[in-house]
Image: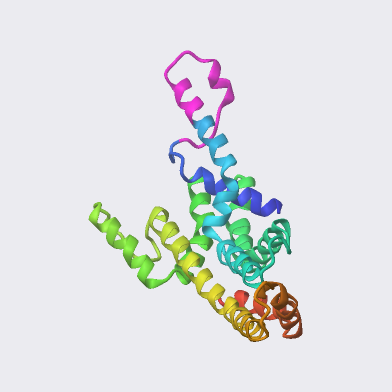
Amino acid sequence: MRKLGLALLLLAFAAMPASAQQINLGALGQTDGSTVGYIIQMFGVLTVLSVAPGLLIMVTSFTRFVIAFSILRAGMGLQSTPANLILISLSLFMTFYVMAPAFDQAWNSGVKPLMNNEISQTVAMERISAPFRDFMARNVRDKDFDLFADLARERGATDTARETIDLRVLVPAFMISEIRRGFEIGFLIVLPFLVIDLIVATITMAMGMMMLPPTVVSLPFKIMFFVLIDGWNLLVGSLVRSFN
């Protein structure tokens, strides 16, 4: 967690001007024009820290996990079980598992040398963002990447290669790609539960039990079906293997 927090914090500094290598709090008492720059820089750092969880969601596998787990709960007809805290915690830990190589590389090649004053902040930003860029480039859908690359070219961008394209183009392409794949996986998850609902609804209608909601009868069958096939093992294993 310490490595992840430091990596995200240093990634946030990448959005700041490269010339601002450090924050000098003593400069706030000066009367020259640089004081305003330091104030703006400090405000930017505090703003980025407040959206750090969003940075985690944007550049990792968290989106696909949380969408699949949420659709699973809805497909089974459970309103609050498992609770949101459990689903989000499971998604986070699975994200740490999938992203462990990227986190380790960012720590060893970027954060650790920077803390030891072996490299500059600009070089550290490039090294920290490199493993996350590679992960997104491997997992982004070609059609989504081409869409944002075309939009970037229309706005004057010249470098649209997947390995070197601006993160402002790669990140939204990766996000909509992950959302789409999450819904694709969710459809496959919900399909067998839908079949159970249809069978139970047909049987209850044939028996003349019009006032009995089919979902009340089908719920225990769906839970039993999911437990018997070892659904959590299959789902989590399939989600982890779906990443390149």
Q: Nearer the viewer, residue 166 or 143?
A: 143
Left or right relative to 226: residue 145: left
Q: Quadrant of the N terminus?
A: bottom right
Residue 152 in view (yes/no): yes
Residue lying at 37% horizontally and 59% vertically, measured from the top left: 165
Using the image, determine if residue 162 lies above or below residue 18.
below
Residue 244 in view (yes/no): no
Magenta residues span: 20-40
Residue lying at 65% horizontally and 77% vertically, measured from the top left: 235
Q: Nearer the viewer, residue 137 or 187?
A: 187
Residue lying at 46% horizontally and 40% vertically, measured from the top left: 16
Left or right relative to 40: residue 80: right
Residue 29: name its quadrant.
top right
Residue 151 drawn at (x, y percent): 29, 58
Using the image, determine if residue 109 lies above or below residue 197.
above
Does the magenta-highlighted stretch encompass residue 22? yes
Residue 138 drawn at (x, y percent): 47, 71
Using the image, determine if residue 145 lies above or below residue 38.
below
Residue 86 drawn at (x, y percent): 73, 60
Q: Nearer the viewer, residue 171 or 121?
A: 171
Using the image, determine if residue 6 lies above or below residue 175.
above
